[in-house]
Image (cartoon, grey):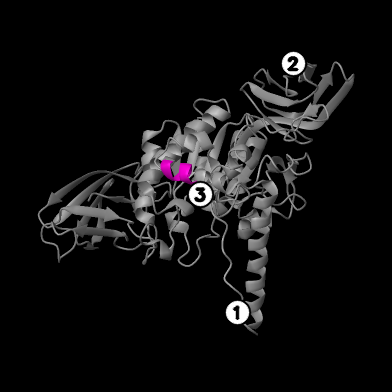
């Protein structure tokens, strides 16, 4: 039954051989200056002793053979150490070498947090050498827990970013690349992301039932329950679909003979379908709960754009649950606002506003803008370095106290002055600027009482001030900026630190 497939595990069931959870392996980075969660498996009731950096801690394995303890906060260190676990009954010892203590970040979301570093020119150049101060582990793409085996140490292997360990997401790499030299510590990234997935896939079932889509989620699980499938039935449904897709793809290449039937996509509720609610929470996220980390980088939303109002509550609930699962009530959570994309005209503007509302209402969150580095035809823009850097700016300013500009200009007030509108902005720093030396900032529109927006000329008339003018609107009432899927001409309004202005609509 689907209820059994998608519930019931607090820590993934790796109980077998006594040892650490698979996420703890050679080259692992432990979080500095915070209590560090360490866990693993042993015989039920067995006493486990863990030692590291002069500390010795003990834990008792529960009835399921799971144990957990905390190491006391440690200073960051450039010298690697050994993490050792001793098991009383088994009389055995397990040790992990090359353990670093530094800063750990979780990189999560959908496809734009999957694209590897090699998609950017800077990433390809960086991959020519090993970066010994940037380590990462990547949770493999998987669905269907608990009917698939838990991850192994090999699948969750930590390694130094470089030619032989090169699959880190571009956004996450450029974040770490910007962060590491400024804080002078090892940076570890755990990547847990999957393309084409909605936020519901990353949330547990019981949480989803209490969100705006709760009724829909309940119906999905009820439909699956009524089908009465077991794990092999669900797998066969996926296999049949994949085979039909392959047949169709082959026919499209040759276009000979009768066209095969169009594949019927599995219905939501199949736990081996990545789009099924809770499926990735069960099969991927649980592999790393409750790893101690400094914060979360979240790049997701393309699969949820049609319901921006629901997304505010969904993402807010998701953040709360992540903080609960990872045992850090104020865990910083940094969101990437969706990039510019031509086909996104209908939903993108409102969805970007929804992401900003989460930033404005949920404590210890931040928003990294990417609307100026999008691609008109590609929902996966390759200009990822500015996105990673802007996420790093948030962390450097908020967490590491390095007084780093982290936000672009944001609308503070609007006043109509006859046929013109005067806008005032926060976060202009030393002043607003236009990047391409144009006389006017692009992307501004105004409307009168009819709410028909037209393009407006936008002149910088003060350090924090923009004046809008549209001759065809004699009495402007509303103003908006960057309120489209894609932008022609390109957006060009920044503050003195080169950070782009935030989109807005006063309608």
First in residue order: circle 1 vs circle 3:
3
Residue in the picture at 79% in, 35% down = 26
Position of 376 compared to 20: left or right?
A: left
First in residue order: circle 2 vs circle 3:
2
Q: Mark 1 points at which residue?
A: 259
The residues bearing labels 2 and 3 have C-alpha atoms spaced at a distance of 38 Å
- Residue, far bottom: 256
The reply to whether residue 3 is visible in this rendering is yes
Q: Mark 3 points at which residue?
A: 198
From the image, give the main secondary structure of the stretch colored magenta: helix
Position of 428 compared to 382: left or right?
A: left
The verdict on residue 208 being magenta is no
First in residue order: circle 2 vs circle 1:
2
Q: Name the residue under label 2.
A: 60
The residues bearing labels 2 and 1 have C-alpha atoms spaced at a distance of 61 Å
* Crowd band around label 1 with a 10 angstrom C-alpha radius: few (<14), some (14–19), many (20+): few
Residue contact at pointers 1 and 3, CB within 8 angstroms: no
Label 3: which secondary element: loop
Magenta span of residues:
215-220
Residue contact at pointers 2 and 1, CB within 8 angstroms: no
* Crowd band around label 2 with a 10 angstrom C-alpha radius: few (<14), some (14–19), many (20+): some
Label 2: which secondary element: strand
Residue in the picture at 85% in, 16% down = 88
Residue 308, given in percent of the width and then of the height, sits at: 37, 48
The reply to whether residue 400 is visible in this rendering is no
* Crowd band around label 3 with a 10 angstrom C-alpha radius: few (<14), some (14–19), many (20+): many
317 or 96, which lies in front?
A: 317
Q: Is residue 175 above or below residue 11?
A: below
Label 1: which secondary element: loop
Mark 1 or 3, which is nearer the eye?
1
């Amino acid at each position: 039954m689907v209820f059994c497939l998608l519930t019931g595990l607090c820590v993934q069931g790796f109980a077998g051989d006594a040892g650490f959870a698979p996420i703890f392996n050679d080259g692992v980075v432990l979080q500095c200056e915070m209590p560090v969660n360490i866990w693993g498996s042993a015989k039920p009731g067995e006493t486990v002793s863990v030692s590291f950096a002069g500390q010795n801690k003990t834990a008792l394995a529960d009835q399921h053979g799971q144990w957990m303890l905390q190491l006391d906060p440690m200073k960051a260190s450039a010298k690697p150490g050994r993490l050792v676990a001793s098991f009383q009954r088994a009389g055995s010892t397990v040790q992990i070498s090359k353990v670093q203590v530094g800063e750990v970040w979780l990189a999560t979301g959908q496809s734009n947090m999957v694209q590897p570093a090699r998609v950017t020119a800077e990433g390809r150049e960086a991959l020519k050498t090993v970066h010994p101060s940037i380590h990462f582990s990547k949770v493999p793409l998987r669905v269907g827990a608990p009917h698939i085996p838990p991850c192994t140490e090999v699948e969750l292997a930590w390694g130094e970013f470089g030619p032989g360990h090169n699959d880190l997401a571009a956004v996450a790499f450029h974040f770490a690349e910007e962060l590491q030299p400024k804080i002078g510590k090892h940076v570890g990234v755990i990547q847990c992301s999957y393309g084409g997935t909605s936020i519901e896939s990353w949330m547990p079932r019981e949480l989803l039932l209490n969100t705006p889509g709760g009724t829909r989620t309940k119906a999905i699980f009820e439909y699956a329950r009524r089908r009465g499938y077991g794990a092999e039935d669900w797998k066969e449904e996926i296999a049949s679909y994949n085979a039909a897709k392959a047949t169709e793809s082959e026919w499209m290449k040759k276009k000979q003979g009768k066209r095969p039937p169009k594949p019927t996509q599995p219905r939501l509720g199949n736990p081996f379908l990545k789009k099924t609610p809770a499926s990735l929470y069960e099969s991927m996220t649980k592999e790393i709960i409750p790893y101690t980390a400094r914060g979360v980088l979240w790049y997701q939303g393309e699969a949820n754009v049609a319901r921006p109002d629901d997304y505010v509550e969904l993402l807010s609930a998701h953040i709360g649950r992540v903080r609960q699962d990872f045992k850090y009530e104020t865990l910083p959570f940094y969101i990437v606002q969706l990039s510019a994309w031509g086909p996104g005209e209908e939903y993108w503007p409102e969805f970007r506003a929804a992401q900003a509302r989460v930033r404005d209402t949920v404590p210890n969150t931040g928003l990294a803008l990417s609307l100026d580095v999008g691609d008109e035809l590609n929902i996966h823009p390759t200009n990822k370095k500015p996105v990673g850097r802007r996420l790093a700016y948030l962390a450097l300013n908020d967490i590491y106290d390095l007084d780093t500009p982290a936000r672009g200009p944001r609308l503070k007030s609007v006043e109509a002055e006859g046929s013109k509108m005067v806008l005032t902005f926060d976060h202009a720093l030393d002043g607003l600027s236009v990047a391409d030396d144009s006389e006017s900032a692009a992307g501004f529109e105004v409307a009168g009482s009819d709410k028909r927006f037209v393009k407006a000329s936008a002149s910088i008339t003060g350090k924090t001030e923009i004046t809008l003018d549209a001759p065809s609107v004699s009495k402007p009432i509303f103003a908006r900026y960057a309120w489209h899927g894609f932008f022609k001409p390109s957006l060009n309004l920044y503050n003195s630190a080169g950070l782009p202005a935030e989109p807005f609509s006063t309608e």
